[in-house]
Amino acid sequence: MKTRYTLLFTLFFAAGLHAQVRLDSVLLIWKNTSLPDTVRIKALQYVTWRTMNTIPDSSYKLALEQLAFARDKKMQKWEGKAYYNMASNHYWQGEYAEAFRLFQKSLDIRSALDDKQGVAAILGNFGLLYNEQGNNVKAVEYLHRSLKINESIRDTAGMCANYSNLASIYLELKNSAKALEFYNLSLSLYDPVVEQRDIAITLNNIANVYKAEKDYDKALEYLNNSLEIRLKYNDRTGMAINYINLGSLYLTLGDYEKAVLFVEKSIELFLELDDKSGLTAAYHNMGEIASRQNRPRDAERWCSKSLKLAREIDKVPIQSDACNCLYKAYKSMGNAAKALEYYEQYTVLNDSLQNNETEVKLNQLEFEKAILTDSLTREEEKRDLRLAYQDTINRKNRTLTASLIAAGVILLLASLFLVGMMYFRRRSAVLQLKTQQLENQQLLNEIALLKSQVNPHFLFNSLSILSSLVRHDPELSEQFIDQLSRSYRYILEQKEQTLVPLRTELEFIKSYAFLLKIRFDKKFDLQFDVSEEALDRLSIAPLTIQLLVENAVKHNRMSAKEPLTVRVHIDEQQNLVVTNKLQPRSTPATSTGMGLQNIINRYALLTDKPVWAGEREEAFEVRVPLLAGSGQQAVGSRQRAAGSGQ
């Protein structure tokens, strides 16, 4: 079974309690009506896309909610994206007619807005829809139209998706060399760190090519490499596809025990995901295994289920395979009438598919003919131009004076036109620059507003600590004042920065921890586990850790017997993780909710990666995305990469 790319936001990323809490934290941004509409609808887009394969019904309701909000706010671009999400949901459920209708609605809006990336994505998905119905002619046509736009705007994510989908079709047409060429083109463009999921898809598809070439060792190697990545990310759809492909490979090798094991795993996942398209292939594979083991009644049972479902979703290639399987099963059981009935159906369906393949080849010949005709036409045009030019020269020689006057007038008009054009271009560039500056300033103002909530908050708490300390130990108070001045100097020095190096932030936190330890003695401890290499490579929003440590102190009890320990480390996803054991105070502290929400709001302006916070194994944990770079101003660098929701 091949893996297809829908040309969607690559996305925009969910499994288990951790993922659910993270999605819930993003939903909080959507529900926060005080945030800008664009920030809120981006959060809704993230959750809609991330739940499409895992909770399709909920995802569809969110898409409807997104559509209503976009219409109410006159956000036409997001209205187009909402239709796109709804169409994609129907596509994954095998409801191709409704998917086509909704994609067309999105296309009408994207075309009116001249959204080339969105138009390319929808054309590519039209290609996938036609291919699912066995119409490879239309599939190739739409995928090439999509690829042409991707190349014109240098959209590498879209190019990769189209390369892979074209490769899948060439593999169906038994052109393995062409399929490998397109898959390798796609693989060469992926970021090996960021785009692991897309790499897993391509590795799975390359395995199918090697299987077609009977290089089974290579096929098994690539399938296992793909499965390893998908297990790491708990990509259930991808795992199901790998399992069915492993089952098919072991069926080819005659290892029926392993074949059944892997296909059963795929059926279990496809049923959980309500993936009708995947189930048709999995049921057919179980039927083929039973047929090879000379169990015709089991083969008939599985292939009947496959055919029924394939007819429901109009999947012609699987209908053909299922009819052939049923023909063999009834023949083995001695039911000649039934065997003949399904053989006739298989013949009709197979002829239909073969006619489409022939039509593709004829279209390719027509295309080559059109190119040749166009080339000859261009040569004739060039010859006509040369003759016309020579005739013009002869007439100029006969009427030199008139030509010079005419040339002078034309030159004057051209000069005036050129001056005017340069003026308007310069004017346009100035206006464009001012517009960009205004947008950047608006974002800076938003960030500054959030940061202005931090500085007084920190100062008031520190003065409260100092007030308590002066009464008991004046000498220690001097040390406290020295560390406090260093800490506040850091706040003043970074006030113009959106991000700071992680090393700088941690040095400040050590001074801040000193202040806390003076107050709480052995009741409080702060531990770090951060590599030297990460300190200068990664950046963080200033005062982030301070707010999290302050929250831990505020909401948890501490004593000499039961000290409060806050741990700071970096996980594999480049998140800074701050954890403390849950030790709730007997009388909960009054909370304004400013600290954690402040961090969530600041990061919503800085990056698409969300802040996660919640309880985990009797501890409270916060994960803050660390950003690459030197920690300088980040305004203007927030463009999303194509790949998670067009």
Image (spheres, grey):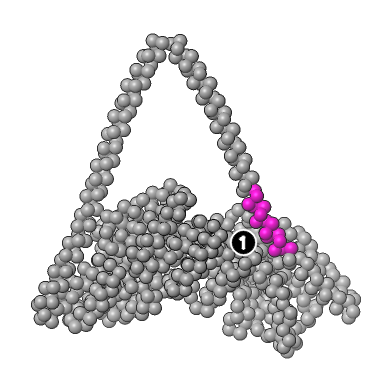
At x 68%, y 78%, the residue is 566
Q: Which residues are magenta?
A: 437-452
Q: Which residue occupies the foreground of this view, 198 or 527?
A: 198
Q: Secondary structure at mark 1?
A: loop
Report the residue marked by disc 1: 36
Residue 111 location (% of width, % of height)? 44, 51
Q: Kindly tell me whether residue 187 is visible in this rendering.
A: no
Quarter-of-image position of residue 512: bottom right
Q: Is residue 416 left or right of residue 258?
A: right
Q: Residue at x 54, y 69 (%)?
A: 573
Q: Nearer the viewer, residue 529 or 301?
A: 301
Above or below residue 212? Residue 142 is above
The crowd level at tag 1 (other Cα within 10 Å; few <14, some 14-19, many 20+) is: few
**Please, what is the dominant secondary structure of the magenta stretch?**
helix
* Residue 537 x, y percent position in the rendering: 61, 61
* Magenta-drawn stretch contains 447: yes
461 horizontally vs 260: left or right: right
Depth order, front residue of 190/317: 317
Can I make out residue 318 in this image? Answer: yes
- Hey, which quadrant is residue 392 in on the image? top left
Question: Does the magenta-highlighted stretch encompass residue 86?
Answer: no
What residue type is disc 1 on?
A: Pro
Residue that extends furthest to the front in the rendered view of this protein: 72
Residue 427: quadrant of the picture: top right
Q: Is residue 122 above or below residue 226?
A: above
Quadrant location of the N terminus?
bottom left
